[in-house]
Image (cartoon, helix red, strand yellow):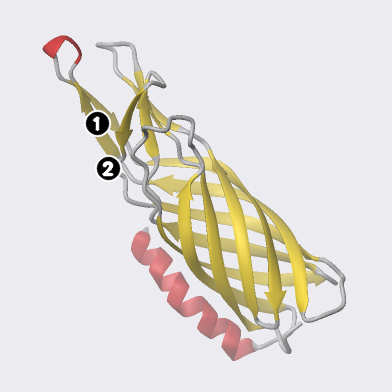
Amino acid sequence: MRKLFLSLFVLVPFVASAQNTKPFKVNVAAGYAATADYSNSDAPTKGGFVYSVEPQYRIVKNLDLGLRFEHSFVQRPEYIDKVIVFQTNAKYILSGLLTATYSLPLKGKFIPYVGVGGGLYHTAPSTQSYRPFNITVTYPLPATNVLGGLARVGVKWGRINLDGAYNMVSTSSVKTSSTGLSLEGRNSYYSVKVGFTIGGGDAE
């Protein structure tokens, strides 16, 4: 799946550049991502690199529909019984979302925009071990495909854009029969990216 994503990241911008038809364009972006869960200050979370490719088609003035593919290297917090915290062994989250982006009809060099989206997030597996009463209990959190949504705001300057987004992603979980407790991975994350638009005719 990761190889397919990398292929899309490389090939789609070339297709957009070759067609250069005004309604169709592709935004390529990269930046930083961090977990959205700070409910426990002891959670050993870690932010990381994120990049995306998003083909878009303008259906009416100021409104684009798109398909965003994103690869985020954020490391989520994981909890047993919502109290015991671990750093995840999952190193990335992949996503494919349908998006709608509305550019505000303002005059000037800088054009603000807002957007929403929804689709599928793929999370890597993670296994944690816990020793209550000197008995080791293993929680194998599998790779999962979960539903999620996107809300974002940004600003465009010609073909360059700055984008801040919140990815609201369903929690992954696994429950063991030996303890009756669950390991939960909190998948939601924030991102800030700088992007460049290819195709779409003249810059807006």
The crowding category of the residue bearing disc 1, from other C-alpha atoms within 10 Å (few below 14, some 14 to 19, many at least 20), is some
Toward the front, the furthest residue is 41
Is 203 left, or right, of 32 in this rendering? right
Does 69 sit above or below residue 91?
Answer: below
Q: Secondary structure at mark 2?
A: loop
**Tags 1 and 2 touching, CB below 8 Å:** yes
Q: Residue furthest left?
A: 134
Q: Which residue is mark 1?
A: 128
Residue 110 falls in which quadrant of the image? bottom right
Q: Amino acid at mark 2?
A: Asn
Q: Is residue 181 above or below residue 60?
A: above
- Under mark 1, the amino acid is Gln
- Which residue is label 2 attached to? 89
- Whether 156 is drawn above or below 167: the answer is below
| Quarter of the image that includes the C terminus | bottom right
Q: For residue 194, what is the image quadrant?
A: bottom right
Dot 1 lies on which element?
strand
**Quadrant containing the N terminus in the rendered view:** bottom left
Left or right placement of residue 141 versus residue 197 in this view: left
